[in-house]
Every structure is written in C-alpha cells, then in structure tokens.
Amino acid sequence: MSQVHLGHIFHVAGSPTVTEAAAALVSIPDGALVIDDDGKITYCGTREGSPEGGTVHDHRPGFLLPGFVDTHIHFPQTFAGDAYGGGQLLEWLTLCIFPSESKFGDPEYAQKAAVEFCTRRIAAGTTAAMVFGSAFPHAQDSLFSETQRVGLRVVSGRGIQTVGTETAQPLMTSEEDAIRLTTEEIEKWHGADTGDPATALLHVAIVPRFSLSVTTETLKNLGELYDSVKDRGVYVHSHLNENNRPGTGEVDSTKETYQVNSYLDTYDGKFLPGSQVGGKSLLGRKTILAHCVHCQDVELERMAETGTSISHCPVSQQFLGSGTMPWKRTIASGVNVSAGTDFGGGDEWLISKVLSDAFKVHISEAGEDSISMHPGEMLFIGTLAGARALDMEHRFGNFDVGKEADFLVVDPSTVPQLDGHLTNGIRSDEPTLARDQTLFQLLMGIREPAIAEVYVRGRRVTAD
Ligand code: GUN
Ligand code: ZN
C-alpha cells in the first residue's frame, strides 16, 4: 500500500551545482509525495495530479522538505555544547573538549549520550549525518546500535589520536591500536544493518581527528588502510584549515609541525617535509573535510579535482572565532560545499540554523566578497549537497522519483514567530520572488518544535 503525504513541497530537483540550485528549486504549494512499500518515491507533484489510492497523510498547511544532512557533528561532544573557558580552537580542545570526550570511557555515560545524540538528531530533522566518533569502541557500538534502533542514517568512525597534550592522553592509542581498532570498527559496522553498504543506513569512516593529533606514521598507515577498504565504500573524515589565530593557530602549527606547503598535503599523502610523498592519499568522493576557512587556492582546486567535499560550519566558526569561509572563492573552485553543525563547536543541532548563519556571515563578507545567498542555495547545501558529500546523492537528498524518501514534515504553527512570518509577511506580486520569500522565512525561522515528523526511507523515525 503506497503512502501519500500532502503538504507544501520544497526541494532542489535533479543534480545541480550550488550555482544552479536556485534554478532547480521546486515549490509545490498543494503537493503530494507518494512512497511505495520499499520507502522509495514514486510521485512528487501536485495533489491534483497524483495517482489514486494509498494511505493519505494530510499535513496541510504544513511543509514537506527533504531530510537535513549534517556533514560534520561530534558524537562525543553531545554534552559539551556551550563549553566556557577554553578560548579559541586549540585552547578549547585542551581545556574543554578532551576532558569531556574522555568521559566516554565510561560505557554507561556513552550509552546515555548515544540515546541523547539520536534524540537530538530526530528533534532537528537530521536524517543523515557524518558523525565524528568517540575514541572508545564501546561508545561507537552504542552510537551505531542506537542509530540502527531508531532508524536514522549514519556514517561514523572512532576519532583517531596518536599524539597530543596531557588532557588528550585518555583518547590516544599506540600506532598499532589506531589501525587495529579502526579496522575492527569497519568489519563490525560498515553496512552492518543490511549486509551491503549499497543499501545500508550504517557506514564507517576513517577519522584522524586532525593532522596535529596524529603522526606521519599514522597517516601512512591510514593511507594504506583506506586503500584496502576503498572499494567497500568506506569514508574518510577530518578537519582542515579551521583556525589560524596568530601564535596558537591550528593552520600554522600544522604547517610547522609537518613542514609542508599546505595543510591539505598532510591528508593527500604528501605529509613529509617539503610536501614530499610519504604515503597514499586520503582524498576522494567519500572524503569530507570540515571548515576549510583558510584554504589556499591550490587546496580548493585539489579538493574539487578529487571530489572531496567541504563541510561548512559557520555556527561553530563564530563560536570558536575561526573566521568566515570565503564563499565566492570557495564555490568558484568547483568544490562541493555542504553544511555541518560541528556540535559541540557549534551550539545548534539544527541544520537550518547553520543555513541561517551562513546567510548572515556571507552577506557580511567585506566589499565584493559579500553575497546574499538565494534560499534555493541554502536549501541545497543543507540537503542535496550533503547527500552528495556522503556520495549517496543517488539514494536521497531530494524528491526525485526513485530516491529513498527521507523527509521532514514542518508544522510552523508550533513556533509562533515563524507562523507569524509565514502568515502575515509581505509577498511579492511576482510569483518566483514570492516563492523565495516563503522559503527564506521558513529556513531562517524553523526551530526544533516545528519539526513535526521525520521520515527515513519512508519510515517514521521517533525517539522511543
Ligand atoms: N579540530 C580537531 N578536533 C576538533 C573538534 O573537536 N572540533 C573542532 N571544531 N575542530 C577540531
Ligand atoms: Zn569539528
């Protein structure tokens, strides 16, 4: 029996780039989304033109949006949001984050966090996510088990650290254990729910925390491991060019430590002094690098060339004083840019809050760099570009027929400010601008209570 969901549909159709997203924006005010027993979309169009039959779920006057995709969020920081007293990135990691993440050594605490993490994701409508994992295998078991139980999608891997300051000690392992534990996680969880990564909701990533928390030996070993599991669709995830605070910045420290020409070289197999090749590259279509605020043009070009995606995290970049990713220059390189909360560096679970901050920081860029993002571009980076970053655009990210139905029912009536804007805000006589005005107020104004229902592969996801 097919399921018919009625509401105002917004999605970015087809497979556009971000600059083509506005033209690919689809709005169907009296729309119907029809889903078959396999959870796949068989129809997306007007209610009037929809096929007869099926069980009808009438969400009107609510909205139907593709599920949000968060391409950078930290599971072991579930309880570390709004941590005070750490300053910018490296001080914050040392003083607030490494001690917080060390608490995941306690299996009960980690299990409680896994339940909370999934609950927060459902509340925020994050149907798919690249999740930076805990160093502790039992915590990763809790994360994967709980994610599977509730029915969300996840790509995750244990955070790998082989060097660090004193507070990082509980999170660190030997070089051998770094590889052994990561290999064991891949064997245990990659594609574990269906037995086939092509149909699975659960996937594993290789996750060196960042270049400063590993060594040339770790990077060499991870390159070899990645090379041996690439064919099975294993992912890579890390941070790049996030913070360059003078004196204690991550970017300069990395270049100094490795004596390389660019930070990206350390992930690209060129981690020996002078950027000499020391091993295999970790870049590719299944690699996501978070932040990329301070990239050189050659780094952006190399990411575009290899199909590596950026997770753009403006909420976190403001919290940690990391700066603003230059939007026009980054996009001009052709690299795919998706959206990440970076919770707990960011203090919001909602991807739409990331889109809202993206709008604000990019319109505030200086002079010619300032840009007013189109709401279609905002929706794109929070949905389809995220699916692309996860190399699963063929499976979800919009409402094209044949895709797996990951979607949100948004009910503005539960958020009075949003409801007021949508009901009483001005609308242009020009239909396209009026459409854009509605989507913009919707994306800027969504708060958790407005996310009324969440579906993955056509199945309702709830916390209990
Ligand atoms: N770089 C290395 N680790 C982290 C982290 O936990 N959060 C952020 N924002 N950046 C990092
Ligand atoms: Zn992060």
Image (cartoon, rainbow, N blue to C red):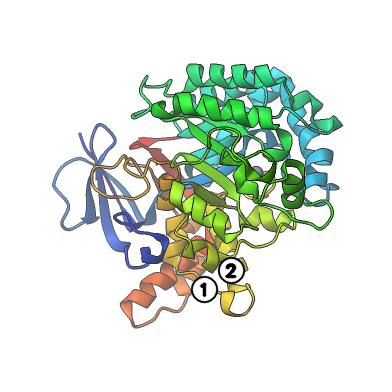
Q: Residue at x 37, y 63 (%)?
A: 21
Q: Which residue is mark 1?
A: 372
Place of residue 463 in the rendered image (x, y in percent of width and height, measured from the top left): 52, 32
Q: Are marks 1 and 2 in contact (CB under 8 Å)?
A: yes
Q: Is residue 416 visible?
A: no
Q: Residue flagged by tag 2: what amino acid is it?
A: His
Place of residue 205 in the rendered image (x, y in percent of width and height, measured from the top left): 52, 31
Q: Which mark is residue 396?
A: none
Q: Residue at x 25, y 52 (%)?
A: 32
Place of residue 429 in the rendered image (x, y in percent of width and height, measured from the top left): 34, 83
> SS of the residue at dot 2?
helix
Can you tell me whether the CB of the residue at mark 2 lies under 8 Å from the nearest atom of ligand 1?
no
Which one is in front, 370 or 27?
A: 370
Q: Is residue 428 visible?
A: yes
Vertical position of residue 413 compared to residue 34: above or below: below
Which one is in front, 418 or 374?
A: 374
- Residue 390 is drawn in which quadrant? top left
Q: Which mark is residue 362?
A: 2
| Marks 1 and 2, the one that precedes in the sequence | 2
Name the side, left or right, on which 74 lies relative to 196: right
- Ligand 2's image quarter is top right
